[in-house]
Image: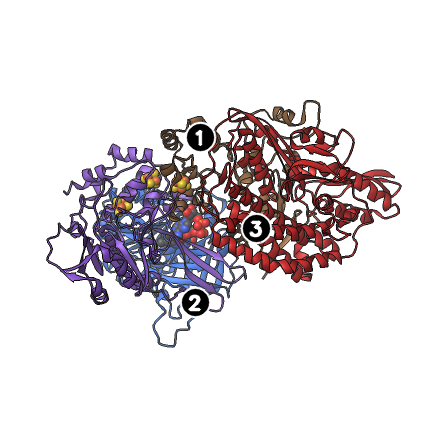
Chain colours: A brown, B purple, C red, D blue
C-alpha cells in the first residue's frame, strides 16, 4: 500500500496536538508503516518543505506573518489541510484577549521600548486564511481522533466533526451532572463532544476546550447558569477561554 | 401466593448470583443510581425511583462494534458468548422499555448482537411508587411490562408473580426463601400498560401550537432526554480503518433526533431544520412510533427525560393537549 | 565572503527557533540563537482572570511540561490565597510531576536525541534501524503518560489537578497496577543508563556552565534557588535575581543573573547540585554532552521516586476527598519547581481573587544565555570545520538543552 | 442476519459519466452456480436501493441504477460528494466493497400496467429512474405511453445522454431534456431546452386518469413539480416520489429516515404523494 505522505507542524501553540500524536506509543510503530512523516520538525529531521503532501496537519492559530507564509505554502502543497486542535479550529487560549489591542498586550509583556514580536497580530483560526478541509478539535484532541484521522486519510476520507455536545457523552457514561446536581459552571451543553466527557467523568466541570457546538442555545444556557448563581459575564468569560467568538 | 420476607433478601440475592451475573440499581458514591454489578454483601437500592440510564444500556451499548472487517474474510458480526445475566429491580416502565426495544431489534430479522444479549437476560421486576416526574399512570401504553419474575413490594416482604417459563424455573431455585401467604395486594402498577390508544391524525400535531416554540426556546440541545430514555434507540453508524491498513471496524453509537445532524443529507441539507420542527419529530416518534413500532406510544412514563433535563422541560402538558388526557 | 546563514529551523525540539551561523571567508565565525516562536502573551492573558482559572490557562503554555506548569501555577495561586492542600494532594501532585518527568525524558532520549547518535532522522528512522531501542523508549514514555493520566486525568493539560486538590482521586487498584509496571521497567533502566553511557561522543568537548536548580523540597520541588557557586536565593526574590530582560533577536526573555552571570538549568544541573555522589562521574561531568546521560540517570530516579510515592499513597490509604474550597482573597504567591528541562517559576498577584499580575520564568528562557555562550564555544572548538559539520553540531548542542521554545516565549 | 451483514463484491467496471459522477458495475463474490437464483442483493426492483460499504470508511445508501442481470451484475451511479463517496472516485476494477440489500419498496410496477407513464428526473435522480426506464423498456408492451422529462444543471451534467438519445430513436418513448444554464453544446442535443424542470411539463399532453408519474430529483424540485402535476389533473395517488433521507441501517432501526410515521427505508423510498401530503418535513 502507498504510504500517506504527511506534513505536520505547529503555529502559535503549545505543541500539544503534535505531542498527542507522539503519545500514541502503542500505535506509533504500526503507524510508521502506513504514514510517511515527511515534514514534522518537532520529531524528524531535516525540516525542509519539499514536494507535495497527501495531507498537512496543522496545529495552532496564526499570529505572525512567518506562520501565514508557512500555512499558505502547506496549503499549496497538500491535497488536504486539516486543522488539528482547538487553536487551529477556533483560536484557542492564545486568542483569549482578542478584543484587546495587540500592541498593548505586547508592551505589557515586553515593555514599551522593545522590538520583540513586533509583527504579532491577534490570533486567527486557520480557516480565516486558508481553506480547511477537515477539523479535529480538542485541547488537545484525543489519541483515537488522531489515529482515526490518519487511517481515514490513508483511504482518502476525511473525518466528520462531531456536532453534539459534551453532555451527550457525559450522560452516556452515566456520570453525575455537575450543572444540575452540583450547580457547577459546567460548559458541557455548549461544547463540542468527542472527548468522552473526560472532565465531568472525574467530577471536574467542562471548561469548553473543544469549542462551541453548532446551534448552541446560548440564551437558555445563560438563563440556567444564572439560576445556578453565575453572572452572565462570568459565564461568558469562561466560554471565551478557548473561542473568542462567543458573545452573549 | 408465593411470598418472601424482606429479611431473606440477602439470601435471595445469593441464590440469584448462582444463576448469573446479578445487576441491580446501586447508589454510587457520587450520588448517581445506576444499574450495575451487585457485589456480594451489598444491597440493591430498591427505593430508588429511577436509575440514570435505563436498562437499554445492557442491550444496546452506548457505543459498540457491530461489524469487523478483514480483507480475506469480509465483514463479520463480532458475536461473543454472553454470560447469563440477571437484572434485578426493574420497574414496570423499564420492563415496558425492554419490550419496546424487543419489537425493534427482534422480529423477523433480529439484530444478532441484541438477540444474543437479550437471550442471556433474566428480567426481575420490582414494584415502585411513582414520583412527580413519572407519567406511567397518565398515558396508557399498549406495551407490556414483560418479565420473568415480578416482585411486588409490601410492608414487610415481597409477593412474587411468575411471567415466563424461565421465571417458573428460577422460582424452583428460589423456593427456599419463599413461603405461601394469602395477600391482598394493592392494584398492580403494571396494569397501566396494556391499553391501546387510537392514533390521532397527523394534523393534530398542530405545528402552530405555541408550545413547540416554547420547548424549542428552552432546550439547550444537551441530549440527556434521549440518552436517558428507555425507548430512544436511534443510532449513528461509524466506520474506522485499522492500523494494519486493511482491517476495519464498524460502530454504532446512540444518536438523538434533536440534533441537527440527525436528519442531514448530502450537501448539508436537513429535513428538520429548526429545533421546534425536531421537537415535533421527536414527539411523533415517541408518541406515535414508526417502523416496527408504528402506532405504539413509546413513552413508558419513567420520567427520566423530565428528571434529567437541565432546562426542566416537560412534554406532559403538550401531550395532554395533543392526545387528550387519558386518566 | 561574509554573511550569515540560518539552520532552516531547529528540529526535534519543541517550538520554533533557528541558529544563525555567521561566516567569514568560508569559515563559521559565530552563531546566534533566534527563538522566533510567536508569543501568546500569557502573562498579559492571565491578568483579569479569576483565581480558579489561572492554572487552567497557564498550563497551556506548553504540552510537554503542562503538568509541571499546572502544579507550579496551582501552588503559586494557593500560596497567594493562603490555601493549604492535603498531604494526599501533595503526594499526588508530586507523582504527576514525576510522570511528566518520565514521559519527557523518554521522549527526549529515545525520539529526539538518540537519532543523532545512531545516525537516523528521527523516531521513524529508529523504527527502521533500531526498533528495540525505540520500543523501549516508547514503553517508558507510555508509563510516564499512564501516571500523568491516572493522576491528572489526561497526559496533556491535566484537568484533574485542581485548585485545592484533585477532582477524582485515583483508585488504589490503578496505582498498584502502575507500581507493578514501575518495578518491571526498573531493571531495564539500568540497561538504558549503560547503553546511553556507552554511546559515542557526539560533540566536541564543550564545557558546561555554572549550574542552577530549585532546592529545599522533595525531588523536583523547592522553595529556593541554589547555584553551583553556593548562592542561595529564596523563591520570593528569585524573579528579581533571575533578572529577565528583552534582548534583540529573540521573543524569549533572557536571564542575566545579577545582570551579568550565566547559569544553566536542567538534568545536569540538578544532578550536580542535588546528588553528586550517587551518579557516575560522567553524568555529572563538566561536559555539555553529558546531558543525555544525566537525563537517563534522572529517568531512573523518577521511576524510583514514583514508586516510593505510590507506596506512600497506598500505605496511607488513598481516598476521595473534596478539593479545599478557596475564597477570593488578595495576596502574592510564588512557586518554584523543576520541570523536565529545568527551573520553573510561577508568580501571581491577586486582588480579591482576580489576578492583577503574572510572572512566569521558564527553563528554556533561563538557558537561553547558556545556549548562546555554548554555541560560541563550540564554534571556537570547531575552528577548521566546514559549514555542514558545524551546522549539525550546533543542532546537537542545542538538543543537549532539550529546549522547549513555546515555554521560553509563552 | 443477511440484511445486517454486507456480502463482499468486486467492482468489475468503472465509467466516468461526468466530472463528479461515476457508473460502477459490481458483482457479488459468491459465484452464483449455473441456474441458481441470483444472490439476494442482485435481485431487486427499480426504485429499491442497497447499502454500499467501503471497508474502513463507511456505508452509504445507493439506488440500483440498472436492472437485474442474469450474471448478477449490479450497476450503481454514484456522485462523489462526501466522506464515503469521494474515496470511491479512486475505485478501480478489482476493488472490494460490501453490499447489503435490496432495501425499500421501489416503484409499484403492478399498478403501472397498461397506464401511461411520465418519468421526471432531476440531476442524480436519473440513477433510479434509469433502472425504472430500463425495466419498462424490457416489457414495452405492458405500458401505455412513455415520457421522460430530465433536467440537469448544465449540458455536461446530463447523465446517460448517449443512451437516452439512442432510446428515443429506437424505442417508443418521448424524451425531453432541460438544463438550468445555456451551454455551448446545447445545440447538439435534440429536445433540450434551457429551462427549469417543471417548465418541461408545459410540453407534455397527458391523460391524467390513465397516467402515473414517477419522480426522483433534488428535494427542492418536488414541491413545484407536484403542484404542476396536480394542476394538470393528476391525482395525488398517481404521483410517486423517491425520497432521500439519511439512513444508517436500512432495516427500520436507526431512526434517521422517518417521514411522519413512515420510514423511508422500509415504507419507501418511493411514496405516493397522497401518503406524504401534510407531513411536516416530507418535501423540505
Ligand atoms: C434511498 C437513497 C438512494 C440514493 N441513491 C443514490 C445514488 O444512486 N447515487 C448517489 O450518488 N447517491 C445516492 N444517494 C445519496 C447518497 O446516499 C449520499 O450522497 C451519500 O450518503 C453521501 O455520503 P458520503 O459519505 O459520501 O457523504 P458524507 O460525508 O457522509 O456527507 C455528505 C452529506 O450527506 C449526509 N449523509 C451522511 N450519511 C448519509 C446517508 N446515509 N444518506 C444520506 N445522506 C447522508 C451528511 O449529513 C452530509 O450532509 C441516495 C440516498 C438515498 C437515501
Ligand atoms: S456534567 Fe456538564 S457535561 Fe455532564 S451532563 Fe452535566 S452539564 Fe452536561
Ligand atoms: S419519553 Fe421521557 S418519560 Fe417517556 S419513557 Fe422516555 S424518558 Fe421516560
Ligand atoms: S434534556 Fe432537555 S435540554 Fe437536553 S436535549 Fe432534551 S429537552 Fe433539550
Q: CA distance from mark 2 to mark 1?
A: 58 Å
Q: Quadrant of residue B206?
A: top left
Q: Residue at x 26, y 53 (%)?
A: B90
Q: Position of residue A54 (x, y in %)?
A: 59, 51
Picture quadrant of ligand 3 = top left
Q: CA distance from mark 3 to mark 1?
A: 32 Å
Q: Secondary structure at mark 3?
A: helix
Q: CA distance from mark 2 to mark 3?
A: 49 Å
Q: Residues within 10 Å of mark 1 (few under 14, many from 20)?
A: some
Q: Secondary structure at mark 2?
A: strand
Which chain does tag 3 point to?
C
Q: Residues within 10 Å of mark 3 (few under 14, many from 20)?
A: many
Would you place residue A138 above or below residue A107 in this image?
A: below
| Between marks 2 and 1 in the image, the one whose residue lies nearer the viewer | 1
Of residues D187 and C23, the one nearer the viewer is C23
Which chain does tag 2 point to?
D
Q: Which residue is mark 2?
A: D27
Would you place residue D63 above or below residue B309 in this image?
A: below
**Which of the image's four quarters has the N terminus of chain C?**
top right
Residue at the outermost front position: C316
Per the rendering, the mark at residue C145 is 3
Q: Position of residue D170 (x, y in %)?
A: 37, 60
Which chain does tag 1 point to?
A
Q: Is residue C202 left or right of residue A191?
A: right
Q: Which residue is mark 1?
A: A235
Amino acid at each position: 500500500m502507498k504510504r500517506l505522505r504527511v506534513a505536520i507542524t505547529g503555529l502559535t501553540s503549545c505543541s500539544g496536538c503534535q505531542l498527542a500524536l507522539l503519545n500514541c506509543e502503542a500505535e506509533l510503530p504500526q503507524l510508521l508503516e502506513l504514514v510517511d512523516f515527511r515534514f514534522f520538525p518537532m520529531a524528524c529531521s531535516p525540516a525542509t518543505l519539499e514536494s507535495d503532501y497527501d495531507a498537512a496537519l496543522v496545529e495552532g492559530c496564526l499570529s505572525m506573518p512567518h506562520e501565514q507564509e508557512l500555512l499558505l505554502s502547506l496549503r499549496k502543497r497538500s491535497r488536504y489541510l486539516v486543522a488539528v486542535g482547538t487553536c487551529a479550529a477556533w483560536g484557542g487560549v492564545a486568542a483569549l484577549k482578542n478584543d484587546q489591542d495587540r500592541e498593548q498586550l505586547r508592551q505589557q509583556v515586553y515593555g514599551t521600548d522593545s522590538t520583540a514580536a513586533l509583527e504579532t497580530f491577534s490570533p486567527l483560526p486557520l480557516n480565516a486564511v486558508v481553506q480547511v478541509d477537515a477539523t479535529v478539535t480538542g485541547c488537545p484532541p484525543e489519541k483515537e481522533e488522531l489515529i482515526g484521522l490518519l487511517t481515514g486519510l490513508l483511504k482518502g476520507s476525511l473525518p466528520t466533526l462531531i456536532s453534539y455536545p459534551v453532555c451527550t457523552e457525559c450522560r452516556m457514561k452515566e456520570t453525575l451532572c455537575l450543572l444540575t446536581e452540583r450547580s457547577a459552571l459546567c460548559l458541557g451543553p455548549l461544547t463540542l463532544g468527542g472527548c468522552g466527557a473526560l472532565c465531568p467523568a472525574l467530577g471536574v466541570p467542562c471548561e469548553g476546550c473543544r469549542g462551541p457546538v453548532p446551534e448552541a442555545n446560548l440564551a437558555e444556557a445563560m438563563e440556567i447558569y444564572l439560576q445556578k448563581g453565575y453572572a452572565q459575564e462570568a459565564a461568558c468569560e469562561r466560554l471565551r477561554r478557548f473561542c473568542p467568538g462567543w458573545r452573549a | 401466593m408465593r411470598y418472601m420476607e424482606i429479611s431473606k433478601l440477602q439470601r435471595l440475592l445469593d441464590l440469584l448470583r448462582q444463576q448469573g451475573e446479578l445487576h441491580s440499581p446501586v447508589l454510587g458514591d457520587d450520588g448517581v443510581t445506576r444499574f450495575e454489578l451487585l457485589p456480594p454483601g451489598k444491597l440493591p437500592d430498591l427505593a430508588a425511583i429511577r436509575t440514570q440510564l435505563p436498562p437499554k444500556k445492557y442491550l444496546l451499548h452506548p457505543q459498540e462494534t457491530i461489524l469487523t472487517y478483514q480483507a480475506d474474510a469480509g465483514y463479520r458480526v463480532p458475536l461473543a458468548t454472553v454470560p447469563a445475566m440477571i437484572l434485578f429491580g426493574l420497574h414496570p416502565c423499564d420492563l415496558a422499555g425492554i419490550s419496546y426495544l424487543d419489537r425493534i431489534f427482534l422480529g423477523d430479522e433480529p439484530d444478532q448482537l441484541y438477540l444474543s444479549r437479550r437471550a442471556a437476560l433474566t428480567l426481575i421486576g420490582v414494584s415502585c411508587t411513582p414520583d412527580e416526574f413519572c407519567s406511567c399512570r397518565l398515558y396508557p401504553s399498549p406495551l407490556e411490562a414483560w418479565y420473568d419474575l415480578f416482585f411486588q413490594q409490601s410492608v414487610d416482604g415481597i409477593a412474587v408473580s411468575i411471567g415466563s417459563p424461565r421465571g417458573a424455573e428460577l422460582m424452583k431455585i428460589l423456593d427456599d426463601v419463599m413461603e405461601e401467604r394469602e395477600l391482598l395486594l394493592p392494584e398492580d402498577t403494571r396494569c397501566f400498560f396494556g391499553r391501546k390508544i387510537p392514533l390521532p391524525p397527523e394534523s393534530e400535531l398542530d405545528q402552530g401550537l405555541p408550545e413547540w416554540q416554547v420547548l424549542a426556546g428552552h432546550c439547550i440541545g444537551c441530549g440527556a432526554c434521549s440518552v436517558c430514555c428507555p425507548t430512544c434507540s436511534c443510532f449513528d453508524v461509524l466506520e474506522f480503518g485499522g492500523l494494519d491498513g486493511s482491517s476495519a471496524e464498524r460502530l454504532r453509537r446512540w444518536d438523538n433526533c434533536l440534533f441537527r445532524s440527525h436528519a442531514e443529507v448530502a450537501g448539508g441539507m436537513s429535513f428538520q431544520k429548526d429545533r421546534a420542527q425536531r421537537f415535533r419529530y421527536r414527539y411523533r416518534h415517541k408518541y406515535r412510533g414508526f417502523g416496527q413500532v408504528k402506532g405504539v406510544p413509546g413513552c413508558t412514563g419513567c420520567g427520566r427525560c423530565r428528571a434529567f433535563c437541565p432546562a426542566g422541560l416537560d412534554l406532559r402538558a403538550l401531550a395532554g393537549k395533543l392526545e387528550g388526557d387519558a386518566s | 565572503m561574509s554573511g550569515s546563514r540560518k539552520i532552516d529551523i531547529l528540529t526535534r525540539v519543541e517550538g520554533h527557533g533557528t541558529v544563525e551561523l555567521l561566516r567569514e571567508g568560508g569559515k563559521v565565525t559565530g552563531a546566534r540563537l533566534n527563538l522566533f516562536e510567536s508569543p501568546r502573551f500569557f502573562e498579559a492573558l492571565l491578568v483579569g482572570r479569576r483565581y480558579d482559572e489561572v492554572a487552567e490557562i497557564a498550563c497551556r503554555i506548553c504540552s510537554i511540561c503542562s503538568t509541571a506548569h499546572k502544579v507550579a501555577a496551582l501552588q503559586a495561586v494557593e500560596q497567594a490565597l493562603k490555601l493549604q492542600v492535603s498531604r494526599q494532594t501533595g503526594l499526588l501532585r508530586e507523582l504527576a510531576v514525576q510522570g511528566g518527568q518520565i514521559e519527557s525524558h523518554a521522549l527526549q532520549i529515545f525520539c529526539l536525541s538518540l537519532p543523532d547518535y545512531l545516525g537516523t532522522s528521527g523516531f521513524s528512522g529508529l523504527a527502521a534501524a533500531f526498533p528495540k531501542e525505540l520500543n523501549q523508549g516508547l514503553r517508558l514514555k507510555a508509563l510516564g503518560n499512564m501516571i500523568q493520566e491516572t493522576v491528572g486525568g489526561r497526559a496533556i493539560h491535566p484537568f484533574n489537578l485542581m485548585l485545592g486538590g484533585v477532582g477524582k482521586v485515583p483508585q488504589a487498584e490503578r496505582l498498584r497496577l502502575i507500581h507493578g509496571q514501575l518495578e518491571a521497567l526498573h531493571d531495564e533502566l539500568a540497561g538504558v543508563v549503560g547503553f546511553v553511557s556507552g554511546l559515542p561522543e557526539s560533540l566536541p568537548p564543550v564545557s558546561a556552565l555554572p549550574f542552577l536548580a530549585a532546592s529545599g523540597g522533595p525531588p523536583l520541588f523547592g522553595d529556593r534557588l541554589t547555584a553551583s557557586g553556593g548562592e542561595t536565593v529564596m523563591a520570593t526574590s528569585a524573579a528579581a535575581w533571575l533578572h529577565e530582560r528583552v534582548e534583540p533577536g529573540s521573543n524569549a526573555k533572557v536571564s542575566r543573573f545579577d545582570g551579568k552571570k550565566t547559569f544553566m538549568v536542567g538534568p545536569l544541573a540538578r544532578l550536580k547540585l542535588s546528588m553528586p555522589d550517587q551518579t557516575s562521574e560522567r553524568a555529572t561531568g563538566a561536559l555539555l554532552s553529558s546531558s543525555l546521560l544525566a537525563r537517563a540517570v534522572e529517568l531512573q530516579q523518577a521511576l524510583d521516586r514514583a514508586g516510593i510515592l505510590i507506596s506512600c499513597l497506598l500505605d496511607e490509604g488513598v481516598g476521595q476527598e473534596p478539593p479545599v474550597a478557596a475564597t477570593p482573597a488578595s495576596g502574592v504567591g510564588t512557586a518554584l519547581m523543576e520541570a523536565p528541562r529545568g527551573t520553573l517559576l510561577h508568580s501571581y498577584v491577586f486582588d480579591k481573587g482576580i489576578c492583577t499580575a503574572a510572572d512566569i520564568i521558564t527553563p528554556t528562557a533561563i538557558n537561553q544565555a547558556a545556549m548562546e555562550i555554548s554555541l560560541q564555544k563550540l564554534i571556537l572548538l570547531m575552528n577548521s570545520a566546514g559549514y555542514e559539520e558545524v551546522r549539525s553540531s550546533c543542532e546537537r548542542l542545542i538538543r543537549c538543552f532539550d529546549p522547549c521554545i513555546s515555554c521560553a516565549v509563552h | 442476519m443477511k440484511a445486517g451483514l454486507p456480502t463482499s463484491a468486486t467492482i468489475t467496471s468503472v465509467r466516468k459519466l461526468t466530472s463528479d459522477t461515476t457508473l460502477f458495475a459490481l458483482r457479488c463474490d459468491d459465484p452464483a452456480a449455473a441456474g441458481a437464483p441470483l444472490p439476494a442483493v442482485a435481485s431487486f426492483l427499480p426504485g429499491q436501493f442497497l447499502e454500499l460499504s467501503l471497508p474502513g470508511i463507511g456505508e452509504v445508501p445507493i439506488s440500483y441504477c440498472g436492472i437485474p442481470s442474469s450474471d448478477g451484475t449490479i450497476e450503481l451511479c454514484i456522485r462523489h460528494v462526501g466522506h464515503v463517496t469521494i474515496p470511491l472516485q479512486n475505485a478501480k476494477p478489482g476493488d472490494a466493497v460490501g453490499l447489503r440489500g435490496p432495501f425499500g419498496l421501489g416503484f409499484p410496477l403492478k399498478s403501472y400496467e397498461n397506464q401511461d407513464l411520465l418519468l421526471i428526473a432531476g440531476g442524480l435522480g436519473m440513477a433510479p429512474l434509469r433502472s425504472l426506464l430500463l425495466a419498462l423498456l424490457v416489457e414495452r408492451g405492458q405500458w401505455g405511453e412513455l415520457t421522460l422529462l430530465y433536467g440537469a444543471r448544465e449540458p455536461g451534467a446530463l447523465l446517460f445522454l448517449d443512451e437516452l438519445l439512442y432510446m428515443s430513436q429506437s424505442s417508443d418513448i418521448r424524451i425531453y431534456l432541460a438544463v438550468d444554464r445555456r451551454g455551448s453544446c446545447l445545440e447538439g442535443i435534440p429536445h433540450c431546452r434551457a429551462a427549469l424542470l417543471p417548465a418541461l411539463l408545459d410540453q407534455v399532453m397527458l391523460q391524467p386518469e390513465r397516467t402515473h408519474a414517477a419522480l426522483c430529483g433534488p428535494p427542492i424540485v418536488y414541491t413545484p413539480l407536484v403542484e404542476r402535476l396536480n394542476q394538470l389533473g393528476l391525482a395525488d395517488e398517481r404521483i410517486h416520489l423517491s425520497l432521500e433521507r439519511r439512513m444508517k441501517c436500512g432495516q427500520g432501526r436507526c431512526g434517521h429516515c422517518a417521514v411522519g410515521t413512515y420510514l423511508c427505508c422500509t415504507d419507501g423510498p418511493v411514496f405516493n404523494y397522497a401518503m406524504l401530503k401534510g407531513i411536516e418535513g416530507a418535501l423540505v
